[in-house]
Every structure is written in structure tokens, then in C-alpha cells.
Amino acid sequence: MKRSIAIVLFCCLAVVFTGCGKGGGGGTSTPEEENLSVKLNTDNPAKSISSSHTFTVEVLSKMPSSGVKVNVNVKREDNSVGVYSTEYTTTAAVSTVTISGLPMGQVYCVATVTVTSVTKPANTWTGSFRVLWK
């Protein structure tokens, strides 16, 4: 009887210990990507002394592994006509953008900047500022 209890106990322990292994072949899980946090380094409204304006886009959150896509779209505030547009991909935390083609005079334009994770397109940040060539 003692021998049969020992065998049953041994079998139970064997099942428990083989089930508590490191996990099998499920692959490695990737850590969750941080939500994008971005800062536009410029005045708002920005006043330029020429037809161009330079500012920086600074990703404050951890940079996604494949980088981000930055889209800059500038339109006149009075009639929504497009003035300037660019799109680029970067892995740098800080990138410099120069808007060109600003209309002369007291015409405000709205620059909309959208930053999107290349890895996870649902992870986006959008900001804007006003600019004029004075």
C-alpha cells in the first residue's frame, strides 16, 4: 500500500513539474509601445521675417522601434489654400522642418503636424500652430 501511494505521489509530482516549465515555443512578446508624446518647438503664433519658417519636432516619448512618420501640412487660415506640405520618416527624437512659400503680408497660415508610429499606425499625435510672414 505504501508503495502504491508513493507511485501515485510520484506521478502527480511529475505532472505538476512538467506543467510548470518555461512555456513552450510561444515566442517572445514585444513590450507595449508608448503613446506618442510630441513637442513642437516654435512660437504660436510664429512670426517670420521671410517666406520660410524653421521649427523642430521633438518626440518626448520613447521612440517606436521602426521610427515615426511626420506629416506637415500648411494652409492659409483665410481660405484654406495649401501653402506647403512634406512627409518624412525618422528615428531621430528631434528633427528640423523648414516651411517655405509663406504668403507675404498679414496672412496667417495654420501648420498642422501629425506624427505617426511606423510600427503601430493607430499611435498618432497631432498638433498645430499659426505662422505668418510679417
Image: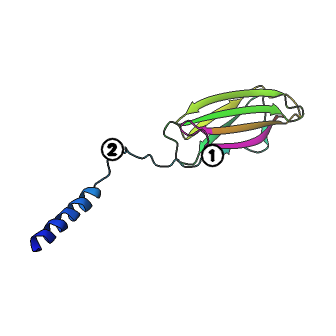
- Tell me the quarter of the image containing the C terminus: top right
Mark 1 or mark 2: which is in front?
2
Instruction: Check disc 1 and give the amino acid type.
Output: Val
Q: Residues within 10 Å of mark 2 (few under 14, many from 20)?
A: few
In depth, the one of 118 and 47 nearer the eye is: 118
> Label for residue 128?
none
Q: Helix, strand or loop at disc 2?
A: loop
Q: Is residue 80 left or right of residue 12?
A: right
- Specify whether residue 10 is painted magenta: no
Report the residue marked by disc 1. Answer: 38
- Tell me the quarter of the image containing the N terminus: bottom left
In depth, the one of 5 and 100 nearer the eye is: 5
In depth, the one of 117 and 5 nearer the eye is: 5
Q: Position of residue 24 (x, y in %)?
A: 32, 47
Report the residue marked by disc 2. Answer: 25
Picture quarter containing residue 112? top right
Picture quarter containing residue 105? top right
